[in-house]
Amino acid sequence: MDYKALFNKLSVKSASGHWLYQRVTAVALIPLAFWLIIFMDKALNATYADTLAWLSSPINTIAIVAWTLAVIFHAALGMQVVLEDYVSTITIRKISIRASNLVFTFLGLAAMYAIIRILLKG
Amino acid sequence: MTPNSNRPLSPHLQVYRLPLTGVISITHRMTGVILSMGMVLFVYMLFAIAAGQESYAAMQSFMSFWLFKMVYWGFIYALFFHLCHGIRHLIWDMGSSFAYATLDKYAVYELIASLSLTLITYIIL
């Protein structure tokens, strides 16, 4: 098997890899969006114990972690396309894409950290 | 790659009146950007839960302020809109329903579906 060719095809640096990942994460996010809505409803309206119990249940933990990972990737790829279309100066475009990726990476790590802290409580 | 600086920028939003499909298309992008910004609220909720009962209660009272309630429901609508038009894009990606006559029809379906899903969520939750 030609791993180098496969890697190049699946790399986000290649246009088809970018296109594919945008779609793969999109499909994953369709069912996961409903977990997000239930999570936010719990967080805004339920008691503390209720929210902790909900988040600590394995299926909900996995769904929220999966949503976070998929959405960070999906959002970073989407934001890159928007920046590529509207930022015409190449240098500024490249810097803003890097900055956007950095912000999303940070948000994802922060979310993971908070989820670990919550699981240690529950 | 040496870019030609005279190239036009894509999409020209101010030059002509967009058809319904065009409005839907740019709204898809705008809701995508808005939802990305909404990620901050999601992370804020997680941190409030992680920090304990008091910060959780503080977050709940902060988010129950009318302005943030509007932001929250705007987020939910943006999510459903992006979901509906996203599914439309996936149908296109499979290579079907490009027929001109169906475009406006699907656009209306998307609007109705995203509004209904938001309303159903509002009623159920």
Image (spheres, rainbow, N blue to C red):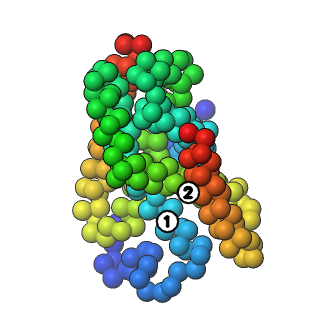
x then y, percent, for residue A19? 53, 52
Q: Which residue is found at the position 43% from the left and 24% from the top? A: A47
Residue at image location 72% in from the left, 76% down from the top? B100
> Can you say which quadrant of the picture contains the N terminus of chain B?
bottom left
Residue type at numbered disc 1: Thr
CA gap, disc 1 and disc 2: 8 Å
Residue A95 occupies which quadrant of the picture? bottom left
Total count of labels: 2
Structural crowding at the residue carrying mark 1, measured as other residues with C-alpha within 10 Å and reported as few (<14), some (14–19) or many (≥20): some
Answer above or below: position of A88 versus A32.
below
Q: Residue B56 in the image: x percent, y percent?
A: 33, 28
Identify which amino acid the numbered label 2 is placed on. Phe
Residue B56 as seen in the image, left or right of residue B70? left
In the figure, is residue A111 to the left or right of A14?
left
Secondary structure beneath dot 2 equals: helix
Q: Earlier in the sequence, mark 1 or mark 2?
A: 1
Q: Chain of mark 1?
A: B
Q: Nearer the viewer, residue B11 or B121?
A: B121
Chain ID, mark 2: B
Residue B81's mark? 2
Q: Residue B81, how many percent across, how many down?
A: 56, 57
Q: Name the outermost residue toward the bottom.
A: B16
Q: Quadrant of the C terminus of chain B?
A: top right
Q: Are marks 1 and 2 on the same chain?
A: yes
The answer to whether mark 1 and mark 2 are in CB contact below 8 A is yes
- Residue that numbered label 1 is attached to: B27
Secondary structure at numbered mark 1: helix
